[in-house]
Amino acid sequence: MVVLLSACRSSNGAKSDALLMIPIPTRVTVTTGTVPGLGTILTDSTGHSLYMFPPDAGSQVHCTGACAGTWPPLVIQAGHKPRAGGQVNTADLGTLADPNTGADVITYGGYPLYRYASDLTAGVANGQDLFSDGGPWYVLHPNMQPVTVNPAPTITPTPATIPIAPPSLAPPPTLSTGSGS
Amino acid sequence: MTDDTADESDRTDAPRRAVNRRTLLIGGAGLVVGAGITEAATALTSTSSNLGPAVPSPGEDLMTEHGVLKRLLLAYQEASTQLAAGHTPPAAAISDAAQIIADFVEGFHEGLEEAYVFPRVRDQHATLVQTLLIQHDRGRHLTTAISAAAAGDLTKPATRTALGRYLDLFVRMYAPHEAWEDTVIFPALRDATPQRTLNELAERFSELQNQQYGDAALSQMLDRVESVEQQLGISDLATFTPPEVYTS
């Protein structure tokens, strides 16, 4: 169950969550991009990796509440259809009612799509194969299969192998409203 | 999306939630270290909420959760110290601590920050918010590494060295991480957010915590933290008190 304590009505009459500051555009394009070690995967139109969550199998949205902060759903205003780019098959795109925002969450092969809050630049997938909020998170190949490999070196009991790269201070992803994601 | 308008019907059970929230905050057995933090947080971020003084502000709520993290950082620090001294700390304590951190801190607490706090202060503190987000990610990966190492053979020098290194990296990152959030981000949230929205955020945080963990969430977490502390021999706050200092 999801809390919608503070809600308002959008122009189409659907309830939206005024507290959860996720923009709800009317135009969203799901396309493909390349991430080193992962190959061609689904991204949004700004090149940010898109993830699936296996517990969502059966066209459900299990990532609600605080989870939606770490894994913001890729949403579109209800009544609008997402567009396909790159190697994305239009027929595999769909939408589900999003219990977080009151809008629709975009699906691919029935799986709701999410971004990862800590992917601050395009072309990275820091959340790949991360166990979080009760399950693993995977990027998606355009053939609808989750990519389950971990691009980072396996962390072995050797201190030098742990990735401690300096923080990237690139600007955060801009989630535009009304002109695609 | 930033409209502060709320359905009044959604707030009819606010008193019940307020009682639950107060129970959570004052009912946590073993809340020793965190008590001072909570008092400081109240002084810093308390609001004149029309829901009554029993409802903690979002900043106070998040700082209380930081108190839980601080105690787990002390546990990590102790485990690392024991490793460095050639002892073998109880692996279960480290695994339990990592599990609490993964679930309550990295899953729930940081999710709240990422959903409700960072978007409201990003304009004023863009670089800091980016660093905090990167550290959230590093922390999640470090926790995975700590869990894996703690499940390994702690008689092997390489495993011990790696585990100690991961624990030290985690503590080194999160101590300043939460200090910056407490002193910069949460005050900025208060400054940037209308009182009505702060009240709604307080209610939201309370409701989400009750949904995810039940009414006794904080108390349950503190019981688990205390168990970790007992396994490591640091459950008595008095053990942290230095000998009396004499000046010549």
Image (cartoon, coloured by chain):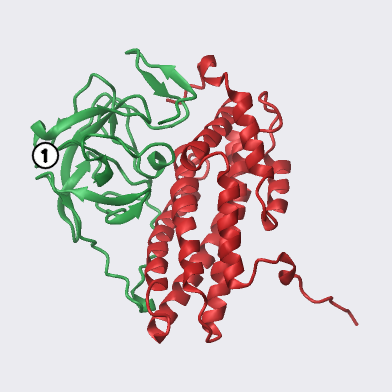
Chain colours: A green, B red
Q: Secondary structure at mark 1?
A: loop
Left or right of B111? Residue A142 is: left
- Point out the image quarter for the N terminus of chain A: top left
Say few, some or many: other residues with alpha carbon within 10 Å of mark 1 (under 14 / 14 to 19 / 20 or more).
many
Residue in view at x 20 percent, y 56 percent: A148
- Point out the image quarter for the C terminus of chain A: top left
The amino acid sitting under disc 1 is: Val
Measured as percent of width and height from the top left, residue B61 is found at 60, 42
Quadrant of residue B198 within the rendered picture: top right
Measured as percent of width and height from the top left, residue A32 is found at 15, 44
For mark 1, what is the residue?
Answer: A88
Residue B22 vs residue B142, the one in the foreground: B22
Q: Is residue B180 visible?
A: no
Residue in view at x 77 percent, y 74 percent: B242
Residue in view at x 14 percent, y 38 percent: A109
- Chain letter of mark 1 equals A
Quadrant of residue A10 within the rendered picture: top left
Measured as percent of width and height from the top left, residue A14 is found at 35, 17
Measured as percent of width and height from the top left, residue B21 is found at 62, 36
Left or right of A136? Residue B79 is: right
Quadrant of residue A112 within the rendered picture: top left
- Residue furthest right as drawn: B248
